[in-house]
Amino acid sequence: MLTLLLILLPIAAAVLTLATGARIAKQVALIGGLAELGLAVFTWSQFDPSAGSQFGFKYQWLASAGISFAGGIDGISMVLVLLTAFLVPFIILSAFGHDYKNSATFYSLILFMEAALIGVFTATDAFLFYLFFEAALIPVYFLAAVWGGENRAKVTFKFFIYTMFGSLFMLVALVFLYYKTPGTHTSELTAFYDLQLSAQSQGFIFWAFFIAFAIKMPLFPFHTWQPDTYTESPTQATMLLSGIMLKMGVYGLIRLLLPIVPLGVETWGLLAVILSVIGIIYGSIIAIQQRDMKRLVAYSSFAHVGLMSAGVFSSSANGLQGAMVQMLAHGINVVGMFYIVDLIYTRTKTRYLDQLGGISQTSPKFSIYFMILLLGSVALPLTNGFVGEFLLLSGVFNYNAWLGAIAGVTIILGSVYMLRLYQKSMFGPKSNWVEGFKDLSVTESAVLIPLVIMVFWIGIYPNTFLKISEPAVNQILQIITH
Amino acid sequence: MYPIVLLSVFGIVALFLGFSKSKNILLPSTLLFLAIALAGNFYEWNKGPLLYFYDMFRVDNLTLAFNGIVLISAFMIVAISGGFQDNADSEPAEYYGLMLFSLVGAIMMIGFEHLIMLFLGVEILSVAMYVLTGSNKRNLRSNEAALKYFLMGAFATGFMLFGMALLYGATGSFDLSHIQSFVTTTHAGAPSYILYAGLLLLLIGMLFKVSAAPFHFWTPDVYEGAPTIFTTFMSTIVKTAGFAAIYRLLEHSFSGIYSFWWIVIAAIAVLTLLVGNIGATSQNSFKRMLAYSGISHAGYLLIAITAMSKPSQNAIVFYSLAYSLSTICAFGILMLVSKEKTVEGQPDERYEAFNGLAKNNPFLAFVLTVSMLSLAGIPLTAGFWGKFFIFTSAADRGIIWITVVAVLMSTVGIYYYFRVIIASYLREGNVDAIRVAPFYKVILVLATFLTLLFGLAPGILEGII
């Protein structure tokens, strides 16, 4: 029941936000987001990691077809539900400084998005998963398209068609799997795990799933929609896309691809890891060249997700656990980074590194929080990025030492582009653009402080979160080796 | 059976109502007639299967469901027709009369048990449609459309009759059950090429009516030239009735020679999908795009026919319903918008006419968005489940490759359906606040509500047939 409540609460909050109108929309939306966070934390307090899927709900949806409206939370879901519920209130809060037109619609779309995301992370029926997977796209499309920058129409259109294209292949694969289930057919994910498929059909399904998730994350070479969409979208949509929606792809790999087509992974996994590693290096090198801060963070996100996917495809406990904790860490860091970029942009009206400089002279608080989030991104020990990257790299290294070594370069490249970003914007002589740069206001600190706390929490004591997902990850691994 | 009798009588009554001084009575009475016909239709629910008119007409839950879709669509279309008061040339009584008559044809096509009944149904439906297409008498394009539709339609009818004659020659009967027993018993021993030829010719005639490629060439011009309200009628009711007839014919009589015709239908389905979707991308007129989109939806429905598996029936019913609801919304909004804007005296039916629609008409923009999402098959709308059922019907038969084609084509579909959403939300432009009559609004709200309801709970229609 708790699961269903977690999905319904944001919807109710979204409707309420729409109903109360523009005047108090943001306050209502924030309360809704915080209530969801409270509920998620409560769920966590009741959660027993070793008990498998819990708090489930199941209703007949298409009774004769064996398709049900079913969800539940296991360790993997719990981590991502927590991440979603944690980030959304801050994403809402981060919009307080902006004056968006039709703000009621704006905030309610964020909450609708949250409901769809929680749905994706908790669905235990394959078609329900698909439904939420697609449904999440609609609010974020409108967020990006209506409130975005100049080229928004073209860019978001590309994004929408691209991602839709990918997921339709997943739909075909799901329908195929559904007809492979014995008896009157069922679309429960656990039933899909038990299918004994030939290696050949596993290969086809592998690619159908891979394309869907690779576009969503995005992995090389399906990433071409990403930098433009991240840059053109309003910051809140970018945060949703990079902070949470990207995780739908990684989650899909862990939840669907690995356990359903283990033989496919055996055959094609190496290629997938190679593509991921190419993405890591390629994304990092482009990030180093960037002049636009938002694009830089976008490419850094592209590089990071490559490592997550490489870890997942290594099909090892370290790789999967690393991906889990890295999803949390990356979600927090990237939302923080985009917020920092947004703060700089709203104050100076520029995102170009060569026009910035010397911000640290006037804004000590801002510089400190920025530095901490940045160190999280470059995976300095004791920050959240380190735990994830370390586990991921050890997973990839055990899978293939050469690829592990190449992927390891990400730590160096990451420091290069991130420190360059910091140096160009914060240090050096004060540029004309940053004249009168104010330090953080109370609302802005309220967004950044919790994120910074999380950076340290995950960095210093990752066990809090590793323990949640460990049994579930082991279960997935057991299915693979079985 | 009741709707046939009722609608025939009501059609004549509607013609006579035209003599009365008060023109305002026509619209409400036509709606009343349709409501009565609808009630009469569902009066026979769960009583079937029944045979009427010397076993030439069949009533069972499937035909009643199709009748229901056709009658509800007709009700909505009549409700948004607005009484044809704004044009001095128009003859509302004739239009309503013809619409009611054409519904009789549609219902005969849906429930035929005898090929003569099919022929009568097709002709009753088509002749009325030829007239309605050309009803905008002083408009050249409307005249051209009517002539084109009529000439091509006459050819198609010719093929159809020829096919029926050959089938009669091969099997010795027009009766579907006789044909069926011939196909499964006598024919199984000694294949008859006359039967094959007859079936193919008959199918050509019927595929023409549902605008499947390569028999679609009339569609864009006719849809564009006809007054929009009758385009709506054509694209929903004619298509639903046509698919009901094709399904009935192939499922009932020819399932014994599935291996012969499935590849023909599959090839036509793929061709239709390609032509419809790729054709739609290059259109500048929203109305013409909807014509091509109608072709592409014929392609999806043909996939369910190709598969002819257990889920096919459900898929066709659900898809027709979802498609009709969204199409009515789309054309309904097109009528409102194009009335506001004119280019050289003609209603502006290009995408540009929708620029900036959302600013002053958020309700219309929302309805339009939902209907476009549904036509594109995006989840949470009825259209998604329509496509889903179509895909499952093909997968049930084990034909996966055709769903891959369909999936690729739905991606193309997103491209052209989204153009109008982008125009109304993102493009700069100005559409003044459009006054929407309360009744019009009710229909749009109802159609949108149903689209979303079936999108969230597709199970509520399950198992009723």
Image (tube, coloured by chain):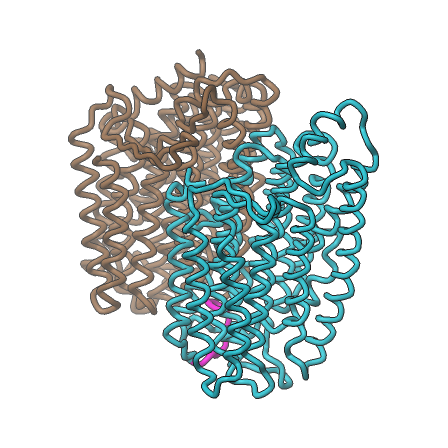
Chain colours: A brown, B cyan
Residue B322 appears in the picture as rendered: no
Nearer to the camera, B437 or A458: B437
* Left or right, residue B250 beside residue A261: right
Q: Looking at the figure, which quarter contains the C terminus of chain B?
A: top left
Nearer to the camera, B410 or A367: B410
Q: What range of the chain is rendered magenta?
A: B423-432
Q: Residue furthest top?
A: A482
Residue drawn at x 43%, y 70% as measured from the top left:
B358
Instruction: Give percent across and percent down for residue A94.
Output: 28, 56
Indicate whether B31 appears above or below B136. above
Residue B464 appears in the picture as rendered: yes
Quadrant in the picture for residue B417: bottom right
* Left or right, residue A247 beside residue B404: left
Residue drawn at x 49%, y 50% as measured from the top left:
B383
Instruction: Give percent across and percent down for residue A356.
Output: 41, 61
Number of disc labels: 0
Instruction: Give percent across and percent down for residue B164.
Output: 76, 46
Question: Magenta includes B45?
Answer: no
Nearer to the camera, B307 or B360: B307
Q: Main structural element of the magenta stretch: helix, strand or loop? A: loop
